[in-house]
Image: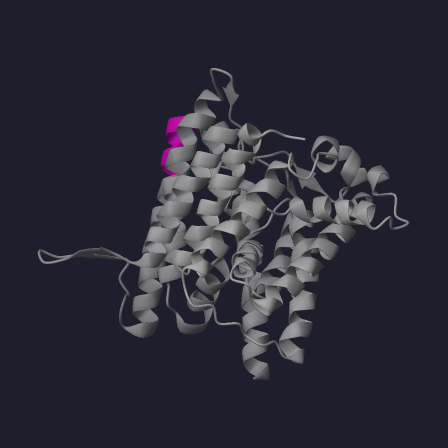
Amino acid sequence: MPDIIHILPYLTIGALLGASLNYFHFGFSSSFSGLILTKDTRGMRSVVVMLGFAILLFSPMLAIETWGAKSFQGYIRPISLSIPIGAFLFGIGMQMGCGCASGTLNRLGQLQPLPIITLVFMIVGGTVAAATFDTWQWLPKIEPIAFQRSFGWPLGLVIHLTILIALYKGLQKYEMKHTGNVNYLIKLTPEEFKLHPILMAGLSLAILNASLLFFTGLPWSISSVFPFWGGNIIELLALPIDWSFWDYTLENEKRMNAHLLENPVSLTSLGVILGAFIISATQSIHLNKPSIKPLLFSILAGLLMGFGAVMASGCNIGAFFSGIASGSLHGWVWFIFAFTGNFLALKVGKNNN
């Protein structure tokens, strides 16, 4: 059984992440939908700022790699064909259900009923992905590519931040072209200095993700918890499934065979739910009564996101947020195909309304 010293950093930072998501009403799926449906780029511009700030905070730790007894490892993954396929499926699920992986944990902490269904089927989807690992792990792949490895730390950092600045400017022009206005993220006048709540959320999440890297040696992630919780449920219910011999389990032996309170991703995810709940407990909780159609959508969304996240080596957190913050090109590949999945789901949904 792990001691409190091991548990505390994960639970504490996880709780602060969940509290930030809830308090500032921040969501990755709403940022995608705002951009695609209403041409409001505030959410996506906040995500871009968050990524840039996280890159700046991650870079010194990843550059030195070790500090005393601490070691720092980013999420730099091979670019496999499984990433675009998984990210595309995940992107569809983001708009069908209760939001992305972090959004589902956030809403679960708000005691909403549908996210419970979504999370259950994320676990099912992620567990199925782990069980079928040997059928898709052999898809074509190339070795990991990271900006700092290709160009060195100073130049790699400049190139990566330049891409983000160009993306931010492009989003501003896109919003101006389609709406005739650019909604503020920062108000700076002689009379007023104000940060929009979603920008404050992005900055908070970047700081907390970097804090997790500093205190634990690894950035924030969620997706690997789905097969981990699935394996524990299989064992708890004594189901006739020998998950310990899956190729996925053998490749992730230490994490998959850890105690429930020793798995860092499990601890952080539980912390996110706890932090969101603490914020909700200070406010009036309005429960939304689910109907049949959203219930079915939540089931399908959970399956798509759970399977897609494991297949794509991460979700909006581990692959997109922490992957790009680590300088890995696979994070950008994930973003492009997840955006395509979001776009398709929103356009089909809009046409069917």
Position of 159 relative to 215 (above/below) = below
Q: Residue furthest bottom?
A: 353
Snapshot colouring: one colour
Taking the spot 58% from the left edge, 77% from the top edge, the residue there is: 289
Position of 36 relative to 77 (above/below) = below
Taking the spot 71% from the left edge, 51% from the top edge, the residue there is: 126
Q: Residue furthest left?
A: 190
- Write down the region rendered in magenta: 153-159
Tell me if I can see residue 165 in this picture: yes
Position of 237 relative to 95 (above/below) = above
Where residue 159 sits in the image (x, y, percent)? 39, 38
Q: Which quadrant does the C terminus fall into?
A: bottom right
Q: Is residue 154 magenta?
A: yes
Position of 142 relative to 269 (above/below) = above
Q: Which quadrant does the N terminus fall into?
A: top right
Q: Residue furthest top?
A: 68
Q: Quadrant of residue 235?
A: top right
Where residue 133 sits in the image (x, y, percent)? 78, 45
Q: Main secondary structure of the magenta part?
A: helix
Q: Is residue 7 magenta?
A: no
Tell me if I can see residue 150 in this picture: no
Where residue 33 sits in the image (x, y, percent)? 47, 67
Taking the spot 83% from the left edge, 38% from the top edge, the residue there is: 244
